[in-house]
Image (cartoon, helix red, strand yellow):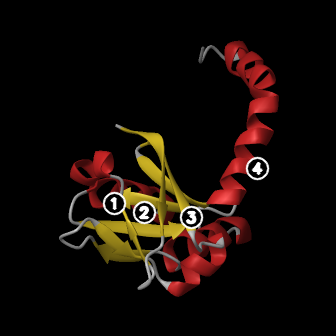
Amino acid sequence: MLIGEYTHNLDEKKRISLPSKFRKELGKTVVVTHGLDNCLFLYPMKEWSKIAEKIGGLSMGQADTRGFNRFMLAGASEIDVDSAGRILVPDHLKSFAGLSGKVVFAGVHSRVEIWNDSAWQAYKEKVMKQADQLAEKLGEIGVI
């Protein structure tokens, strides 16, 4: 399971070192794509196959599902992890998430989210203020 929060820096060659706690589970090749809330989603290949199958199976007859298909699948890139545990995120994805300098890796069960550090801090602050309300809603549907 991918959990935890780690801050790393883009190096001078624009590579990011994956957190050592995630490397074994992620494997030698990962998929990075547009995420929600202006972050990136990073998946191990096995998990990506499941996600891509579900997304690819959505109806092409509806504009919103076609759009989401394009957002997630067309923007995705298979990326090799180098021997030092680093990845090179494509420019279009770095730009989408505003990545520069400090980058946060957030483990979210079966995926890792990659965030611009300041965007992550603002997002966490917002969610922390709503934590009690979110817990109430999850309690109502029997999650917690």
Mark 1 vs 3, N-terminal side:
1
Mark 4 vs 2, N-terminal side:
2
Badge 3 amino acid: Lys
CA gap between label 1 and label 4 equals 31 Å
The answer to whether the residues at label 1 and label 4 have Cβ atoms under 8 Å apart is no
Q: Which residue is mark 1?
A: 49
Q: Which residue is mark 2?
A: 52
**Is residue 91 visible in this depiction of the protein?**
yes
Q: Position of residue 50 (x, y in %)?
A: 36, 54
Q: Position of residue 82 (x, y in %)?
A: 23, 73
* Residue drawn at 41 percent across, 77 percent down: 77
Per the rendering, the mark at residue 59 is none
Discs 3/2, front: 3
The answer to whether the residues at label 3 and label 4 have Cβ atoms under 8 Å apart is no
In this rendering, would 29 be left or right of 9?
Answer: left
Discs 1/3, front: 3
Element assignment for label 1: helix
Element assignment for label 2: helix
Badge 2 amino acid: Ala
Element assignment for label 4: helix
Per the rendering, the mark at residue 122 is 4
Give whichever of 140, 119 is nearer the camera: 119
CA gap between label 3 and label 2 equals 29 Å
Element assignment for label 3: strand
Badge 4 amino acid: Ala
Per the rendering, the mark at residue 102 is 3
Q: Position of residue 127 (x, y in %)?
A: 75, 37
CA gap between label 1 and label 2 equals 5 Å
CA gap between label 3 and label 4 equals 14 Å
**Is residue 37 visible in this depiction of the protein?**
no
